[in-house]
Amino acid sequence: MFNKELEKILPLIEKPARYIGNEPGSIIKDKTRVDVSFAFCFPDIYEIGMSHLGMKILYSLINSQEYALCERVFAPAADMENILRKNNIPLFSLESKTPLSKFDIIGFTLQYELSYTNILNMLNLSHIPFRSAERKDTFPLIIGGGPCCCNPEPVAEFFDLFVLGEGEEVTLEILEKVRSHKKKGTKKKALLKELSKIPGVYVPSLYDILYNENGTVKKIKAKSGAPEKITKRIIWDLDKVYFPENFVVPFIETVHDRAVHEIFRGCIRGCRFCQAGFIYRPIREKSVETIEKQSKTLCANTGYDELSLSSLSSSDYTKITELLERLLGWTANAKINVALPSLRIDGFSDELKEKLALIRRAGLTFAPEAGTQRLRDVINKNITEDEIHRTARNAFAGGWSTVKLYFMLGLPTETDEDIKGIAKLSQDIVNEFYKNPDKPKGKSVKVTISVSSFVPKPFTPFQWEAQDTEQSFLRKQELLRECIRTKKVSVNVHNTGMSLMEAVLARGDRRLSSVLEEAYKAGCIFDSWDDHFNLQKWFNAFVKVGLTPEFYANRKRNLNETFPWDHLDFGIDKDFLIREYKASQKGRTTPNCRTKCSRCGANNLPGGQSDACC
């Protein structure tokens, strides 16, 4: 009956392929023959969610277990949502068209703070109560994972548990526990207590949050035998970790429509604004042999003609030249392009340039982040002006004529001279193109600078810093535009209101669950989309709850303040972050992890190896 209803509504929507499933590589199991069912929910549209490597890995991993199934669910676009509500059809999975509420476990990936209201919308479309305290034993277990779980407190009231860190091993442990308790008929409260004993599992209902009179967190109190601190899960041997032999291949084009292979996890650099660079520590590499074998299998099974090598900084892979030689040995004949994103400016060597010249040419992307050397030292970018110029010369000599540069406004200690420095550096790169005798003939240079707004994040040395006000960001954006005096350079800036809300939710506490609920009721969904975001609705939600966004975003923290995430351990010692914060104030840099270990604490994680970072 449900499929017949679906057949009627699909011709009425813009992109039916978002909802029909049955793509090549999709896995459909008989729900009556498994013990545990898992709905993997991505809180954005199909084209974005299907580009996410984490979903691909866990989807295949869970389905590789005979006793379990995993099906995909994405946030419906506005046209589909309207039809679902009009016809009283609950949100459903792609594989079997099963309503979300009929699964044993609903897993949301928390990739970006501004997707939180989409989670509420997906629950609402499934007729599932928002708050975990309101959901009875008959409702699914709702869990969260992903990078935003380093501070999940703003959505803590909505989830039964969170998974901290890497999910390949802990996900199966959770499934086994749910399977066992399902057979016993255990109540949800007892199950949650048992799940909290699994390393890396955080059950918010087992923690009370006490506040000071000024609104800051006073104490985080564990109860019912829950651990005082929850430590993230980590996979030490990437050659042995599960990786799928096949991906689901969409019928329609997605944001990243290609085969993707993760070559290493973590980052050696320690840029002080970068949350990923800290929470994914320590660095662990996959061997060249494993990458080549798995990539070849993946490309053969999916038929993709592009292979992207995924990491936080691809040029920091210690055997990148050897890896490219091995991959190009068979991808060239198979007409498969190899993409190497996330290049460091100081990693663009002559050897790497030669290998990249054999790959289909596209624009190069680099991230100086700041316009002056002084500010790059403050943020510990560890690249020099000479290296930036040399990289530009090498790129232009190698045949490139399109360069994209990433910068940030509002970084700690920033002055107007630093902003003017962005314009000067961009002009210098244009000049390098025209000075270069080996520049591409008959081509003009194009430099695009993408400028985001600095957002202080948990588990970074800048977690104590205040964010600039919206008015300050707007003034700085205008100053930058005024300083650009060539049509060879184009400027893209980020929505300042969205950056404000990102900062609020990144460092927020549990009271923000009420703000999120009010914002959703006012119509806030797809907040990461410029054409959907409405800052005034968020301001109104804060007023209703009796909180202010400035308290969370624009307030500088004391070094002794208790953070809402202080009971969560991502392997980074707070004392190390304080040392880095103080070093930033003096403009002092810290060597990367391969040059000298800074004793951040990551190697003390369970099962750690003393030489993992070095």
Image (tube, rainbow, N blue to C red):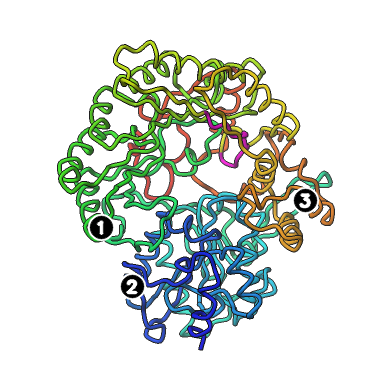
Q: Which residue is mark 3?
A: 211
Callout 2, which amino acid? Gln
Q: Quadrant of residue 431?
A: top left
Q: Residue at x 69, y 48 (%)?
A: 508
Foreground mark, 2 or 3, reads: 2
For marks 1 and 3, the one nearer the N-term is 3
Q: Of callouts 2 and 3, which one flags the residue occurring earlier in the amino acid sequence?
A: 2
Disc marking residue 331: none
* Mark 2 residue element: loop
Mark 1 residue element: loop
| Residue 94 in the figure: left or right of residue 419 | left
Q: CB atoms at circles 2 and 3 under 8 Å apart?
A: no
Distance in Å between CA atoms under marks 2 and 3:
44 Å
Q: Which residue is mark 1?
A: 303
**Foreground residue, 29 or 26?**
26
Q: Nearer the viewer, residue 450 or 400?
A: 400
Q: Which residues are magenta?
A: 449-459
257 left or right of 277 in image: left
Q: Which mark is residue 65?
A: 2
* SS under mark 3: strand
Give how far apart the Cα atoms at labels 2 and 1 are.
Answer: 25 Å
- Residue at image point 49% right, 57% down: 200
Q: Earlier in the sequence, mark 2 or mark 1?
A: 2
Q: Position of residue 260 (x, y in %)?
A: 33, 50
**Can you tell which quarter of the image residue 318 is in?**
top left
Q: Dividing the image into 4 quarters, which one contains the C terminus?
A: top left
Callout 1 crowding tier (Cα within 10 Å): few <14, some 14–19, many ≥20: few
- Separation of marks 1 and 3 at Cα, in angstroms: 55 Å
Q: Residues within 10 Å of mark 3 (few under 14, many from 20)?
A: few
Residue 164, position as x, y percentages in the image = 50, 55
Residue at horizontal 18%, vertical 42%?
A: 332
Which is closer to the viewer, label 1 or label 3? 1
